[in-house]
Structure formats: C-alpha cells, structure tokens
Image (spheres, grey):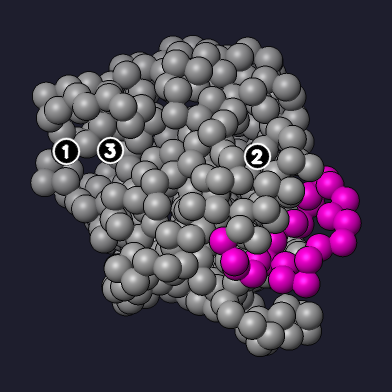
Amino acid sequence: MHVTLLTAGTRGDVQPYVALGLGLRRAGYTVRVAAPDAFRALVLERGLQFAPVAQAFEALTSGASWRRWQESGDDVVAYVRGAFHVTRAAGGVIEALIDDYWNACQDTDLVIGSSAAIGGPQLAEAARVPYCWALLQPMSPTRAFPHFLTPAALRLGRRFNQVTYRVAEQVYWLLFAPALSRWLARRVGRHRLSHRDRHSFLGATSDVVLCGFSPRVVPRPPDWGENVAECGYWFLDAPSGWQPPDDLTAFLRGGSPPVFVALERIGWARRDDLLGLTLEALARAGCRGVLFVQGYPVDLGDLPETVLAVQSVPHDWLFPRVAAVVHHGGPGTTASALRAGVPSVGIPGFYDQPYWSRRIAALGVGPAPIPRRQLTAARLRAAISEMTTSARMRTRAQLLGAGIRGEQGVWRAVRRVHELLDRRRGRGGGAG
C-alpha cells in the first residue's frame, strides 16, 4: 500500500516525518514525502519517494511579513496579527502550496499530514482515501493545559483551557479557509466548506491523530480520546557509515565537553551581535563551544581556540558528546537534546518554540527560556553556567534521556497506521 506524508518548514519540521516514512517503509508500505525542495536529497537518499512543494513554500517564507511574524515570540496578539499579514501577503501562494500537496496525493492509499498540511483532510476526501494528522505539537483539545500558542503569563484554569483550542481553531479557519475554499472550487468543484471542515484543522474529526512527542515530556491528559495516539518522538539517526569531520573529532578530544550553540537557528536580527554575544557568554562562563553555522550569513573571522564552527552534524552523534545545548526551541532540536540526556536552554522566537522552551524548564532539564528579544551576553552566560554546573539538572536530564531512548515512537505510530488501514479495509474503504 502507498502512503503520502505532507510536510513543510525547516529541517526540524521535516526530518521527523522522514523517520516516520522510513518506519512505514520497513513495514512494507511505499512512502512518498511532500516537502520543500531543499529536502529532496534527504528524502531520496533514504529510499523514499519525493514530491516537491518548493516554489510555494519558498515564496511564502521569503517576505518581510514572514520575518516579522517570526519575531512575535510569546505575544499571541502579535503572532495572530503576523499570521494574518503573512497570509494576506501570500496571495495565491497558499493555493499553489495546496496544488503541490494535491499532486502528491495522487495514486495513494493514505494521506498523513503535519500541522503545515493546509487542506490535508479535504485533499484526502477529494482523493477518496483516509487521512490522519501527524503532529509535533499537542493540538488536541484538553482541559489539562491550554493550546501551545497561549502566552505563558495567562493562567486560565481547567474551565477555560479548552476554550483556547476553539480560539486557535477559529484563527486557523480565518487564515486558511478562504484560500482552501477557492482551491476546492477551482480544482474539484466543491464550493462550500462545512462546520466539519472547521473542526478538522485541529484533528477533532480524524480517526487517528499521531503525536510525535514523548508522554514523558507532555503527559497524556485524561480527556484525550482514543483517537489521539501519543507515540513518542520520531528520530532520524545519522546514515550508516557516517563519520565526523577530523577537526571536530580532534576538538572534542582536546578538552572538556563543549556547549553546542545553534547559531544559525536563532533568528537574531543583528547576526554580528549574536556571534559576539555568544563568544562573550562562553568565555565568561569558562566553557568551550561548538557553533552550528551552516548557512550563517556572517564572516566568523578568527574564532578563539576554545570555539569550533561546524556545518551539518547529526544531533544523535554530537549531542551525547557535549555538556549542554543552546537552541531556538524547535521541536526537532529540543527532542534531540532531551534524548541525549544533556541540559538545554531555548532562545525561542515564535510558533511552538516558546512552548517547548518552557517545557524544558518545567521538567527541570534546563534553565528558564531566554526570549529572543531579551537575549544578552549576561543572561546567556548565566544559563550556560547553570547547565554546566548543576548536578541536579544534569541528573534529571540523564534520567529523562534514558526514558526517551527506550521509547519506540516510530514503531508505535506505524502500528496505529496499520490498525487504521485495517479498520478501513474492514469497512470497505472510503474517504477520511
């Protein structure tokens, strides 16, 4: 049977779905991954089919409105305002993105969509195949905690937590329903979106919602339905035979474990300042550093002997060898640091980054996040010092990492997919 995965975003947004696709392939499915063109090689080298969504996604993320949206941080009003500006500026780009997804859905038996899969349920319905969400964020309504976009300062309580999901659903609807409605009318002759379509944006109408995060990190609420499957993380490890660069191996052997800083991932507007700030914080904390700089648009100059710049290095290889991780709070990097059992701190920008950064601190495996707009050398130095000197924090991180490494997130997700398709075959098929 054939399965299509609809994704978009950065590497941390796409890579978990490649891991899920590999698990499905090992289980005997033929798998196609729809993703931005930058990930063509990543998908093809793992033996999966690739469908590009490059042109539309690159256009969507290249404008000034997108950059301002990324700086909205934990301000939900600024986030929603920025989202409306992005979709308004996008024009027909969103419809082109849906076109790319539609092309990827041809000749398939099941469509699985990330949170970026605009119109996924409707596309699957038009293709007359089942659909399920596969989410890297907790988006299913619950009274236990508010929607992940809710500002941390709001303490709403159980009664109003569930309301935040209705608000998020309405925002998704207002953002994407017009473009989706136009696309459906143009391509499949469907001229009206229903109330059920509105609920589909958060997966409420899905037979299965696959959650690609650990129940140790997001404890399962008692009011989630059986359709919500909290599987565990979907990790994509380094290819067999991968070897680290000689300079990195020598650097790691030449002193104490360094602090990894995802310099390229932290969307700091003044990139020169970010480099200087980071070097100052490392020096004042008395720590060595490994800086991730792939695509970083700044001349690094002469770095101190205690600091090494690296391009792409698999997290599953590097993170167990460092003392701590400084990152942007994205789901992929957060998950990798947690699995490695090392403390980390988030410097979040927008979307789910503030949420995951707060979860790190709440679990006691890292300091409180440093919002991007509040980042200073002194605050970064303090966070690095805490991560590298707190025995309690390191012990908590090691215990959590051991638990996550024992989870079988991909296997659990594949099993739920298999059960879904078995039920559908038993009912004689039909759209999802």
Residue placed under numbered mark 1 in the picture: 144
SS label for mark 3: loop
Question: For the residues carrying marks 2 and 3, which lies nearer the camera in this image?
Answer: 2
For the image shown, how many numbered marks are present on the structure?
Answer: 3
Residue located at (19% from left, 24% from top)? 156
Residue located at (78% from left, 80% from top)? 247
User: Badge 2 local density, few (<14 within 10 Å), some, or many (20+)?
Assistant: some
Question: In the rendered structure, are the residues bearing label 1 and label 2 in contact, judged by CB atoms less than 8 Å apart?
Answer: no
Quick check: 176 left or right of 64? left
Residue located at (67% from left, 53% from top)? 280
Q: Main secondary structure of the magenta part?
A: loop
Where is residue 83 drawn, in percent x and y? 54, 20
Residue toward you, 77 or 307: 307
User: Badge 3 local density, few (<14 within 10 Å), some, or many (20+)?
Assistant: some
Kind of residue sitting beneath label 3:
Ser
Inspect the magenta stretch and tell me whether residue 303 lies in it: yes
Residue placed under numbered mark 3 in the picture: 140
- Distance of mark 1 from mark 2, alpha carbons? 31 Å
Residue placed under numbered mark 2 in the picture: 267
* Residues in magenta, as a range: 285-307
SS label for mark 2: loop
Regarding residue 432, the answer to whether it shows in the image is: no
For residue 409, above or below residue 321: above
Residue toward you, 181 or 303: 303
Kind of residue sitting beneath label 2:
Gly
Residue located at (11% from left, 46% from top)? 222
